[in-house]
Image (tube, grey):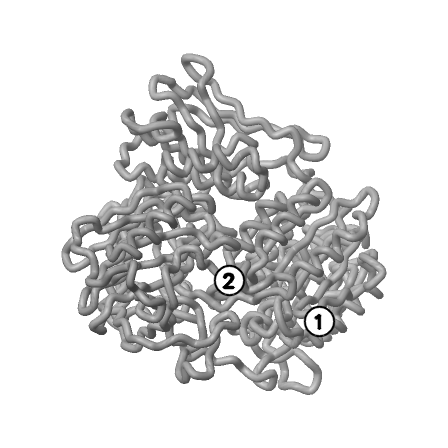
């Protein structure tokens, strides 16, 4: 784990024992990273990030530095500037090979130059190179990007600044040359170590026409100054400062996050292509018919058990697997796939019907899960799944839990894309530094949804939200139509309609000629046997003027993401054209700048010996990351307040503080027996057994536990909603009056 802006390598304490991707270690110099300053501006469901990194070359020689920084895979990186000893240099977006040649020629000629480009294999890492930083000089690097923000399962608008770049696992079928950028290097590199502490400051503004209920964080202690009308806020880190050993996050709770919000951003009349027209961002939560849920699913739970999942990640994954298994509907098929360097299937012969016997086998596996399977060979288990066809008449769904630290993202995405017509993929990224390129990329390629989960977040909540989307039937024949005056000229970006899930935040971008009035927008389609139609009035559109063209650039990034998933050669030219017009970097372009005004560094490139070539590969010192031993880990999961063990032989469980313990006692058919209701409610057996409000004792016990969940775990309702539905269906099958039982059960709990 390495701090933001530095290559993610382990600390280089003894360089003589280190190698870089198999090469001999180079010489060592010291460069001082003095400060990292981040300014964030959030407007509704979009954010702009301006990052500044200040370096000082403490040596007497000019150095060439290269380093990496993590970014969200959906971020639109569009501006790069450098200030070298007071001289400002602005970068230009150019075709990648051309940009790299300009950079290389400039450095070899003795000019200071810089280059920013996306990693060749993963869109959530950027490579930055600074050539010919003069000895004794100071460099300020300024990078700007836009980010799209969505309403999450818990109602929060989540902003996360990636600050951790974990080492990425290199699968066996990828050679070092495939994941090592070398085209821009001008000579023999020397290792440069950032050896001193540096400041890391973050300031944020929240504005944009929404009433703000509160602002909080997964990790941070924030100072929040809310305006008198609650329409804006200033957010700063507390006096303790930020330590970049985890991703920085901010959770914004708007008073009404589910309200339709449509913004029209004015175009640049002097611009070209997309930048010239107006751009409409549509934020909505489409509603599906109640009967859109299907029990005819084949659900494959794929869990990462590689070594990097040790600690909180594997504990949380294990607890989530338990909740998942208990929530599956009868009649579905399922399987559990564990993977690391190898992979294994709970049912090697293929998915099995969800029965009491198969659930028992799955729970036996659950009790033994540890992060003990080596590396992260994610491609092979996905290939294994696709090697057999889906069950006839059943919709195949994959839900993946991983910390996502791999290099072969494109290979996995391409495999998922090729099977998207028959299998949907839902993905969850766990922990700081998880690859957003993998997690969001797989969900996009597999027509599913994705969530990122951080240390203090609720993994169970996020996963069960995905499971509810998974059980929905796919929306078919989706149409986005516009009533405009004059007719025509409207373009959806990307051009293909988005994947829609009922009740989930949907963001669409629409390119609109400047003279066109949008009267209404209609989203329609078919789910199962029912049609749905959601209409939105043009009078709800708010027009804004933004010099940075935030929405235009986010739309460009959305289109680029789709093209990069499609991976079709005939869109390469269009991708480059869009990138150059908007400045948003893609895999085919780069940002390059050259200091033409500076006197060249004092050497003659024609006489320069390779060993005298200025060079540097900037490594960061690793953070002191504690990896717990297995003895420190509770196989029942990291449950926060629920962390007491629920296995036999341990202290009595407080069921009021242990949701997973309540879940573990539920039977396959959705019921709880009376003895379990006694344990859970802590009420005497004689009191509960003496009740007369039931035909079936087990249905009475089940209603008691449902009432207990309502009372003790109302805040976690989204986590236990599916298993509660199973319980209600059990009571209905017993012929009891559910409502009467629930009234009686609530009364017993309230009076005792």
User: Who comes first in sequence, dot 1 or dot 2?
Assistant: 1
Estimate how packed mark 2 is, as few (under 14), some (14 to 19) or many (20 or more) residues with alpha carbons within 10 Å: many
Measured along the vertical axis of the image, is residue 200 above or below residue 148?
A: below
In the image, which disc is placed on residue 314?
A: none
Measured along the vertical axis of the image, is residue 709 above or below residue 543?
A: below
**Residue located at (44% from left, 52% from top):** 118
Question: Is residue 238 left or right of 521 when viewed as pictured?
Answer: left
Q: Quadrant of residue 370?
A: bottom right
Measured along the vertical axis of the image, is residue 53 above or below residue 12?
A: above
Residue 748 position within the rendered picture, expressed as x and y whole percent measured from the top left = 63, 65
Q: Which residue is mark 1?
A: 366
- Asked whether the residues under the numbered discs 1 and 2 touch, taking CB atoms below 8 Å apart as contact, a structural biologist would say no
**Residue farthest to the top, as pictured:** 486
**Residue located at (58% from left, 59% from top):** 710
Q: Nearer the viewer, residue 500 or 27?
A: 27
The C terminus lies in quadrant: bottom right
Measured along the vertical axis of the image, is residue 403 above or below residue 158?
A: below
Q: Which residue is mark 2?
A: 434
**Residue located at (30% from left, 49% from top):** 80
Q: How many marks?
A: 2
Residue 625 position within the rendered picture, expressed as x and y whole percent measured from the top left = 45, 78
Estimate how packed mark 1 is, as few (under 14), some (14 to 19) or many (20 or more) residues with alpha carbons within 10 Å: some
Residue 555 seen in the current view: no
Q: Nearer the viewer, residue 642 or 417?
A: 417
């Amino acid at each position: 784990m390495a701090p933001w802006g530095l290559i993610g390598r382990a600390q280089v304490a003894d360089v003589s024992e280190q190698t870089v991707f198999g090469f001999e270690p180079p010489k060592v110099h010291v460069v001082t990273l003095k400060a990292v300053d981040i300014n964030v501006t959030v407007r509704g469901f979009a954010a702009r990030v301006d990052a500044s990194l200040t370096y000082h070359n403490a040596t007497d020689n000019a150095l060439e530095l290269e380093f990496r920084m993590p970014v969200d895979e959906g971020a639109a990186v569009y501006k790069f500037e450098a200030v070298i000893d007071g001289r400002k240099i602005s970068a230009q977006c150019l075709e990648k090979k051309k940009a790299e040649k300009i950079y290389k020629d400039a450095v070899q000629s003795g000019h200071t130059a810089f280059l920013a480009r996306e990693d060749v294999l993963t869109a959530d890492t950027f490579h930055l190179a600074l050539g010919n930083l003069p000895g004794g000089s100071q460099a300020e690097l300024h990078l700007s990007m836009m980010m799209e923000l969505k309403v999450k399962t818990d109602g929060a608008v989540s902003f996360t600044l990636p600050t951790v770049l974990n080492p990425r696992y290199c699968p066996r079928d990828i050679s070092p040359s495939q994941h090592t950028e070398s085209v821009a290097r001008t000579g023999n590199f020397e290792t440069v170590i950032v050896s001193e502490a540096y400041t890391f400051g973050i300031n944020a503004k929240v504005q944009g026409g929404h009433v703000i209920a509160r602002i909080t964080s997964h990790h941070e202690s924030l100072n929040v100054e809310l305006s008198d009308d609650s329409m804006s806020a200033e957010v700063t880190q507390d006096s303790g400062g930020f330590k970049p050993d985890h991703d920085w996050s901010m959770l914004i709770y708007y008073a009404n996050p589910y309200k339709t919000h449509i913004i029209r951003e004015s175009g640049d009349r002097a611009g070209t292509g997309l930048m010239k027209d107006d751009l409409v961002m549509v934020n909505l939560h489409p509603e599906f018919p109640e009967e859109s849920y299907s029990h005819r699913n084949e659900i494959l739970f794929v869990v990462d058990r590689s070594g990097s999942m040790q600690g909180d990640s594997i504990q949380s994954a294990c607890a989530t697997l338990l909740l998942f298994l208990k929530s599956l509907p009868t009649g579905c098929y399922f399987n559990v796939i564990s993977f690391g360097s190898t992979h294994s299937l709970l049912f090697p012969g293929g998915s099995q019907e969800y029965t009491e016997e198969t659930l028992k086998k799955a729970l036996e596996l659950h009790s033994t899960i540890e992060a003990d399977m080596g590396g992260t060979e994610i491609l092979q288990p996905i290939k294994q799944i696709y090697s057999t066809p889906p069950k006839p008449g059943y919709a195949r769904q994959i839900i993946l839990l991983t910390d996502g630290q791999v290099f072969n993202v494109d290979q996995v995405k391409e495999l998922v894309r090729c099977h998207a017509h028959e299998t949907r993929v839902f993905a969850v990224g766990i922990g700081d530094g998880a690859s957003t390129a993998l997690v969001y990329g797989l969900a996009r390629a597999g027509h599913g949804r994705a969530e990122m989960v951080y240390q203090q977040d609720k993994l169970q909540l996020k996963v069960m939200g995905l499971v509810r989307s998974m059980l929905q039937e796919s929306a078919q024949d989706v149409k986005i139509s516009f009533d405009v005056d004059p007719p025509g000229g409207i373009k959806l970006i990307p051009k293909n309609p988005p994947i829609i899930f009922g009740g989930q935040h949907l963001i669409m971008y629409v390119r609109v000629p400047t003279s066109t009035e949008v009267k209404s927008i209609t989203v329609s389609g078919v789910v199962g046997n029912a049609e749905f139609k959601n209409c939105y009035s043009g009078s709800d559109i708010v027009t804004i003027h933004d010099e940075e063209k935030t929405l235009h650039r986010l739309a460009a990034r959305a289109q680029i993401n789709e093209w990069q998933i499609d991976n079709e050669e005939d869109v390469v030219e269009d991708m480059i054209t869009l990138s150059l017009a908007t400045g948003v970097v893609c895999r085919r372009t780069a940002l390059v700048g050259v200091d033409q005004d500076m006197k060249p560094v004092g050497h003659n490139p024609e006489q320069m010996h390779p060993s005298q070539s200025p060079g540097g590969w900037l490594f960061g010192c690793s953070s002191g990351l504690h990896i717990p031993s297995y003895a420190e880990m509770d196989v029942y999961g990291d449950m926060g307040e629920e962390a007491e063990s629920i296995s036999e032989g341990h202290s009595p469980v407080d069921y009021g503080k242990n949701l997973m313990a309540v879940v573990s006692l539920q039977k396959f058919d959705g019921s709880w027996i009376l003895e379990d209701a006694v344990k859970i409610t802590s009420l005497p057996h004689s009191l509960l057994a003496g009740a007369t409000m039931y035909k079936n004792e087990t249905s009475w016990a089940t209603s008691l536990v449902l009432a207990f969940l309502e009372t003790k775990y109302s805040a976690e309702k989204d986590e236990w909603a599916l298993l509660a539905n199973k319980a209600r269906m059990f009571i209905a099958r017993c012929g009891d009056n559910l409502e009467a039982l629930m009234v009686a059960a609530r009364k017993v709990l309230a009076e005792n």
